[in-house]
Amino acid sequence: MSIAAQVVILFLVVLVGVLCRRLGYFTDETIRGVTQLVVNVTLPVLTVYNMQRPFDVRVLMNFLLTLLISLAAILAAIGGASLLFRHRPHDKRAVLLNMAGFSNCGFMGYPIILAINPDWMIYAVAYNVAYLLVSWTVGVSLFQGRQNVSLKRVLLNPNVIAAFLGFAVFCLNITLPDILSQTMSLIGGLTTPLSMLLIGTRISGIRLSELRDKDYHITAALRLIVLPLILYVLLLPLHLDPAVWSTLYLLTAMPCGTLSAMQAELYGGDARFAARAIAYSTLLSLVTVPLVSMLLYPRPQQTAPIRKDGRCLPYT
């Protein structure tokens, strides 16, 4: 099955989420509860579970390289957007810069990476750590300056804690007991269907009449098309490992990150604009993500070897 087809299957689940929202199966309270479940439980468990793999120095170096490139790419995107949106009002400009810099790499990116190749998850974790680190420092400072920056908040984030635990599991070559590993597999496995359903609930209420502001379209184009293509061109000459290259490219092509809306609400940004921009870019991503996935690193499709516990092993 092609990568684009795998992405389309995920987006069919998104459409089920749209239908469930319109039928009233997902109330606002239900959406909040399930979102907390995914962010604080299933995503962190999925992270640790998928970092169980034989230690490999090459993979370790690729992990660190992914982290560094992710940090550079996010900061460069914010810097470029600061020039593009320099004449916007402060509360809106802060949201626009966050939208440009931060993609939905966890909620939407993880399921897509898993659908394509679970072995790439370790690099998706590196990207997400970079995202959280910059978001709760530089991202917050865009709204109200440095006084609200909290490194403690970064370090206590469940997904950052899970990344450190998973990194330790990988570096120390720890094999978790089967009963624990299978439990984590079940819990982590909830992430993909729940995330896709929740994305459907977010885009179900979007109205085109609310999107007359040209900045909605500029932000979506920047996030979904311009930035991924710039990264594509810049990374090609570097001859990176295909897994690293593909992960960076795919996660950069995700729609606007949902954390930006919460931060806008907390720190005095234009929260309404943020919520609509996220919903709009997510809606458009149903078309753009399958298309940009066709430009993935030209590597023959392989079937990864499977361990006894059902997990994929790295390609050799």
Image (tube, rainbow, N blue to C red):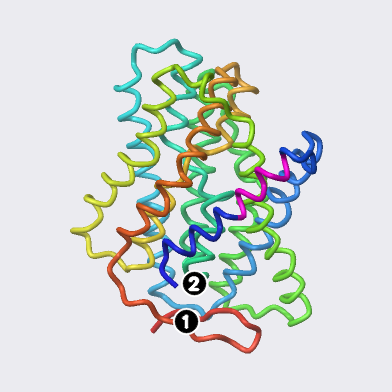
Check if residue 168 falls in the magenta segment: no
Q: Is 234 positioned to the left or the right of 306 in the image?
A: left
- Residue holding disc 2: 119
* Numbered range of the magenta stretch: 13-21
Instruction: Name which residue lies at 55% across and 72% down.
Output: 170
Closer to the camera in the image, 292 or 98: 292
**Which mark sits nearer the N-terminus, 1 or 2?**
2
Assign a secondary structure to mark 2.
helix
Task: Tell me the quarter of the image containing the N terminus.
Answer: bottom left
Closer to the camera in the image, 45 or 277: 277
Amino acid type of the residue tagged 2 in the rendering: Asp
Q: Are marks 1 and 2 in contact (CB under 8 Å)?
A: yes
Task: Give the answer, above or below, for where 94 lies relative to 44.
Answer: above
Task: Tell me the quarter of the image containing the C terminus.
Answer: bottom left
The residue carrying pointer 1 sits among few (fewer than 14), some (14 to 19) or many (20 or more) residues within 10 Å by Cα, namely: some
Instruction: Name which residue lies at 42% across and 71% down.
Output: 59
Amino acid type of the residue tagged 1 in the rendering: Ala
Instruction: Name which residue lies at 29% across and 22% down.
Output: 83
- Residue holding disc 1: 304
* Percent of width and height locating residue 9: 54, 61
Q: Residue furthest left?
A: 237
